[in-house]
Amino acid sequence: MAKKFLESEGYGIVHRWLGAKGFEPFTFQRETWEKFGRGYSGMVVAPTGFGKTYSVFLAVITDFLNNPDRYNGTLHLLWITPLRALAKDIAKAMTEAIDEIGLDWKVSVRNGDTPQAERASQTKKMPEILIITPESLQLLLAQKNNQRFFKNLKCVAIDEWHELIGSKRGVLVELALSQILSYRKTVKIWGITATIGNLDEAMEVLIPYDLKKTKVVAKENKKIDIIPIFPDEVEVLPWAGHLGAKLVDKVVPVILKSQTTILFTNTRSQAEMWYQLLLREYPDFAGQIAIHHSSIDRELRIWIEENLSSGYLKAVISTSSLDLGVDFKPVDTVIQVGSSKGVARFLQRAGRSGHSPFETSKIYFVPTHSLELIEVSALKEAVKQKVIEPRTPVVMSFDVLVQFLMTLAVGDGFDEKSLYPRIKSTHAFSEITDAEWQNLLQFITVGGGALKNYEEYHKVVIENGLYKVTSRRIAMLHRMNIGVIVSDAMLKVKFLGGGYIGMIEEYFITRLKKEDRFILAGRVLEISHIKEMTVFVRNSKGKAMIPSYLGGRLPLTSHLSHFLRLKLSDSLQAKSSEKELKFLHPLLVSQQRNSHIPKDDEFLVEMIETRDGHHLFMYPFEGRLIHEVMAALIAFRISKITPISFSMAMNDYGFELLSSQEIPIDEEVLKQILSRENLIQDVLSSVNATEMARRKFRDIAVISGMVVQNYPGVQKNNKSLQASSGLIFNVFEDYNPENLLFKQAYAEVFNQQIDEFRLMKAFQRIEKSKIILKFANAFTPLSFPIKVDSLRQSLTSEDLDSRIMRLQKEAMRKMIDS
C-alpha cells in the first residue's frame, strides 16, 4: 500500500469515520481506494457481507476528499444494480455514510419504482450518486441530449456483476458502457462481484477497453454453517414435494429461536405454499411473517423490506427476489427449502444471514424429498473445495443490439461509422462482421429483406448522416418496451372495492372460473370477474389453488451435478461424520440391494416392468433440462432399432422412458444408443428444433421490437405475442432464412435449451464410464421420484396421493419378496 495514500487527507477522514463506528478497513478495501486514486479501473471480489459496496463507493468519496477541484457539477458515480430491492438498501447505506462524513452529496435511485416527478427532477439536475438498473440506464440514453447527464461522471460501478454477466441484461450493460465511454473517456469502470468461477474472463467482458486495470481479491473467507433438517425417519421410496411440507413442525422452532429468518424457495408457488403451512402450524405467526416475490404489489414489497431491516418481521418467505446483496442486519438465519440447484446460488442465499464480516452465515436445508440430503453433502464438499460455477457471457445477441440501436436513434441519433467500432469494442459483439452490421442497419431502417414491404418496420430514418427516429409514436412505444426480460403476460389482481394486490400469470388464471379461489401474497382470493388484463377479486377463506408459474424450475448446474455423483459414488463407504449419508443409509442399502449405486466412473440404467408397462430409467445426474433432451434423443435412437413409442418423465437425477411394448435393451444396444456419434444430428431429429426455435423467437421478436408487448394502458397477451411472432418466424423461414434474428433463435436453442456444450460433455463422460444395466422387479429409490413426476402431469393432487401410496406399498412388497 502506498505510504502517500495512507497519509492523504481523504483516507484520514474516511478511516476516522469508520473507526468511530468500530470498523477497521479490510486490506482489499484500502487497496481499491488506493488503486482508484491512481486511475485504475477493475474488479473487486469479496465474500458476502465484507463491504464490497464500501470498497468502490468510498473509493470515490476518498478521491473527492483528496481532489475536490476535479469534481465539478453533479453525477460523479453511476451505480448499476440488477435488483430494485438492492438499490433502496444501497442508497440508504450511502446516504448515511455521506451525512456522517459531512458531505452535501445527494444519492438517488432510478428504476421502474421511481415516481415520475422524481425522475423529472433527476433529469433537470442529476444527484452526485445515481443508483440505477440496466433498463433505466437505457431509458436515460433514449433521452434527447443525454450526453449532459454524464459530463462530470468519474466512475461507473456495476454491482453483482456475476448475476448480470450470464444474461442479456449484462449485454445491455456492456453496450451502455461503450456509449458512456464515448462521451467521457476518463470514466473508471469498477465491477463488484462475489466469488465467480471465471473471474479473469468476467473482468475482460466488463472492461475490454485499453484502460489501466486491476483485480482486487479479498483474502478473507466467510464462515458458513450448513445444517440439514432431518425427517424423523428416512423414506426409502422418496418423492419430490411432499417431505418439505411434513417438516414444517421442525422449521417453526428454528424460526422461533432466531432473531429474523429468510426462508428461500425456488418458485413463487412454493413461497405461497410455505406461507400457508407456517401459519397453519403456528397461528401466532400472523402479523409476524410475510411473503416476498416479484408478483406482489410494489408497496407491499417495500413495506416488507423496511420491516425486515428494522427487525419487526420474524420471518419472510422469499424467492430469488431477496437473493442478492441486500443487507438486512437482523437476519441471523436462512432456510433453503429444496435444492438450490447450484453452489453459487446456495452461497449467495447463505450470505443473507450473519451479514457482518466475522459472523457465521447459518443456513438450514429443508429437503423436499430424502434424496436431496445428498445435495447437502455435495454442497459441503463444494464449499470446502472452494468450487464455484463460472458464468458464461452472452455473445452475438442481435436482438439486444437492435434494441440498443433504436435507443440511440430515439435519443440523439447515431453516426454508424463512428458507432460500429464502439460496438465491436464490446465483448458481446467483438466478432460482429461488416456484413452483419449492415444487415442490422438495413433492418432498423427498412425492415431488412423479408419485411421491407411493411411500413411499420421502417422505424429509423437517416438525416444529415445520423440514424434517427422521428416518429413520436415509434419513440414512445420503444421507451415503453425497453428491457430484455420478456415475462409471460401478467394480469393485475385488484379488490372489487379498490386496492392492488399483485400480478398473476395469464396461463394460470385462464384455467380458473368465476368464484374459484386462489392464493396470492398470502391471501385467499375469490374471482369475481376478469376484465381486459385485470382480475377482480374479493377476500375469501377455505381451500384455494396455489398459482403455478411458467419457468419456475431452475436448472441444476454442472458443478453441483459433479459433486452429487461423487457423493453418491462414495455413499455406502461414507465416513461417519457425514450425517446426511449416514441418515440415508437404509435408502442407499435398498438401492444397492435392488439395483445398484453407480460409482463415479459408472453409468446406471434400470429396466423395470410394472402393470403400467415397460420402464427404462437412466441416471446422468445432469439436471432436468439436459435430461429432457437426452430422453427425446434416447427414445429416437431406440425407435430407429424397433418402431416403438414412449412417454417421458425426468427430474434432476435421471429420466424415464415408458412404453406399453417391451423395450429391446441389452449391453450392445446401450453402447449404440449412448454413443457420441452423430449426436447433434440425432438430437435435431429427436426434438422439434423448429418449434423450440419458434418459441425462442417470440422473446427475440419482443426484445428487438418486431413485436410490441406494451402499449399505453394495454399489455399484449401471450397468445397474441406468440401468434404475431409466429407469423414473422414463418416469413423468415420461407423467404429470408439468413435473417440474423431468425438464426439467433436456433443458436439460443442450441446454447441454452439443448445446451450443446454440456450435452457433449455428458456423453463424453458416459462413453468413458462402465455401463451398468440392472433389471429390477420394482421401483427403486432412484427411480421412484421420477415415476411420481410423470404421474403429476395427469392426476389431481388427491388422486396423486392415493396412487403414490399404492405404488409405494406395491414396490416395498416386491422388494421384501425378492
Image: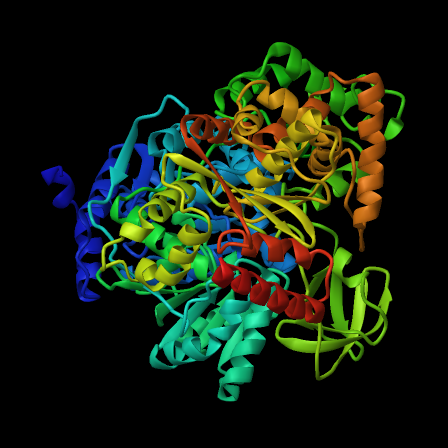
Image quadrant occupied by the N terminus? top left
Query: Is 655 placed above or below 514 here?
Result: above
Which corner quadrant of the image does residue 20 belong to? bottom left
Residue shown at the point (77%, 45%) measured from the top left: 709
Relative to 344, 697 lies left or right = right
- Closer-to-camera residue (442/328): 328
Q: Residue furthest left?
A: 3
Q: Residue furthest bottom?
A: 284
* Residue 175 drawn at (x, y percent): 54, 31
- Closer-to-camera residue (88/362): 362
Residue 152 seen by the camera:
no
Residue shown at the point (70%, 83%) measured from the top left: 542
Query: Is 1 placed above or below 499 here?
Result: above
Relative to 482, 558 lies left or right = left
Which corner quadrant of the image does residue 189 belong to? top left
Count the labels in the image.
0
Residue shown at the point (13%, 37%) measured from the top left: 2
Relative to 313, 122 lies left or right = right
- Closer-to-camera residue (498/271): 271
* Residue 319 drawn at (x, y percent): 53, 60
